Image: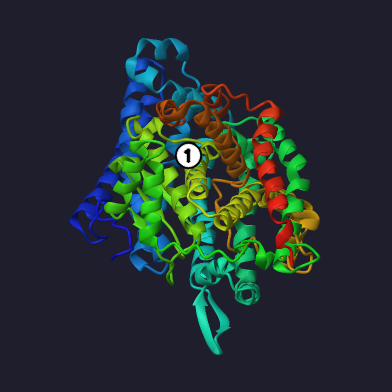
Amino acid sequence: MDYTWSLKELYPSFDSEEFKRDMEGFDTYIEEYKNWVDATTTNYEDAEKKLEQYIEIESRGAKLISKLYNFAELTLSVDTKNDKALKYSEILQVKSASTAEHQAKLQRWIGGVPDMDKLIAASTILAEHSFHLMEIVEKSKYLLSDSEEAVIAKMRNTGSNAWSKLKDLLTSTLKVDIELDGEKKQLPLTVIRNMAYEKDRELRKKAYEAELAAYNKIQDSVAASLNGIKGEVITVCDMRGFESPLHETLSKSRMDKETLDAMLTAMRESLPAFRKYYRRKGELMGSKNGLPFYDLFAPVGDVDMPFPYEEGKKFVVDNFRTFSDRLADFAQKAMDNSWIDVKPKEGKVGGAFCSNIHAIGESRIMLNYGGTFSDVVTMAHELGHGYHGECLMQEKILNSDYPMPIAETASTFCETIVKKAAVKNASKEEAFFILEQEISDCGQVIVDIYSRFIFESEVFERRKESSLTAKELNDIMVHAQKEAYGEGLDPEFLHPYMWVPKPHYYYASSNFYNFPYAFGLLFAKGLYAEYLKRGKEFAADYDKLLSVTGKNKIADVTKLMGIDVHNVDFWRSSLKTIEEDIEKFLELSKDKVK
């Protein structure tokens, strides 16, 4: 069976007539867009008509660039050495950057439109896009001059975009030296990292040590990439008038500082409970000084729960159906129509992601499926992202862009469905295994995410003064892990290079892509509790919630479900459910300690 995704729904190839036609069409569109902006922004006469024209031309451009850009980037994600994909990715970035000056001019014009509220009320089209328009008004105060915006956009192509591509190339092509069964091998980094889930402890440790040793080959180049990206972010944020990169991220996330502070407060309060879990797991592994990093994802017990991909697919679809037919049917559609790229391979980037392509009404999901229960959970997670996109397909494309924190809600909700289902059908030993996996996953989203937040905050603070060496980045990462995990991890076996394989640090346009995962987990747990109360009737309201995430601020989205994210007690209540699982784990594991 072919475990690669199909991109022909976008274009047959880079040499196809369809792709060439749309590339030419993009040039035509850019010229039309610039001429229209120049003619439109001279005054505010017929402002209602001009705003309606803006919605039409912006929507048309969004669909076109979505198809072209996704084709290039999705190709690159599974084949980082693809010359044509690299070429067209850069060409598209340059073409898009050429509109920056006019985009700034237009957004500034929209920000100054008199009586915007009245115009919106008088037009069906504008009313449908009211949130989009008012968000432009709000963000226009951070715009620079038209020429400055143009320079920044163009410089990014040889700055942060280029650094990000270099990092992807370095990590995706890195060969890790390891000896297995007496034979010396060179394996892709993604394969080595998947060994963290193996049952054989010696293999996990060997893979961990080999991984750390391999980073010596690329550490300076990746550090340069991170410094280049973070330095650019700091400079641009300062020019725009943001207090910090975190301030800009919160603005983009449609989230206020009050919400973040309430969530972080509850997360810090929960750390002692997680540390108890890590120490107990370390004891189960035979360690007395905390959990070594190479045992962080180790399966607990003698349970053997392999999940070949075909079995994983069926398990996900069957259990999604317990929630709703629509969710299950979506997952089956994604599987049947080759929307998923499944296996790890050389040249493929690590991790997993979902790209919702509104322009064609489809999604594409990348996995590095290794055949474990954790891989099944990851598949459910990414299908959750895809389902979120499915619920937004009926919305106009300008109303389909949701912020980072909400982005992790549907994915985490789908994870929960699969995990709960697995426990129901499990033996006592399997249930214990799954319980531990659930806590481990929650620990990644609460404790490890907190360490990543600390790391990124410190990197931004120190990068203001100068570039950071690979050793300095390692030291910051170790400090962050110690602050978050505390005595839960063995201090002799941490992971100083965790800044290298995590892709989120290298997104210049999406900084602090860490706390949104915690938001998604805890908000999803609140939603799941509501689902348990209401049963299947909850599904319709859940779908509606997802469908409006592109045109509301986060606090307003959560209010639809009666949740106040400014209240620390909400976050505490969600974390309480995890803490109860930890207590259950500690009780059940008493007779298992070596």
Residue furthest bottom as drawn: 182
Q: Is residue 14 above or below residue 575?
A: below
**Residue 143 showing in the rendered view:** no
What residue appears at the point 75 percent right and 60 percent down from the top-left corner?
A: 489
Question: What element does badge 1 sit on?
Answer: helix
Percent position of residue 148, x then y: 54, 41
Q: Residue at x 62, y 59 (%)?
A: 226
Instruction: Inspect this view and state whether residue 402 appears.
Output: yes
> In the orientation shown, which residue stands out farthest toward the left?
17
Residue 389 percent coordinates (x, y) = 39, 39
Relative to the observer, which residue lies in front, 389 or 99?
389
Q: Identify residue type, mark 1.
A: Ala
Q: Residue at x 71, y 34 (%)?
A: 261
Q: Residues within 10 Å of mark 1 (few under 14, many from 20)?
A: many
Residue in view at x 77 percent, y 40 percent: 269
Q: Position of residue 56 (x, y in %)?
A: 31, 29
Between 193 and 586, the residue placed more toward the observer is: 586
Q: Quadrant of the C terminus?
A: bottom right
Quadrant of res 368: bottom left
Badge 1 is on which residue?
A: 410
Left or right placement of residue 533 versus residue 80 in this view: right
Screen quadrant of the N terminus: bottom left
Q: In the image, residue 381 lies at what x, y percent?
A: 47, 48
106 vs 211, left or right, is left
Q: Is residue 558 left or right of residue 467?
A: left
Query: From what the image shows, is residue 536 above or below residue 483?
Result: above
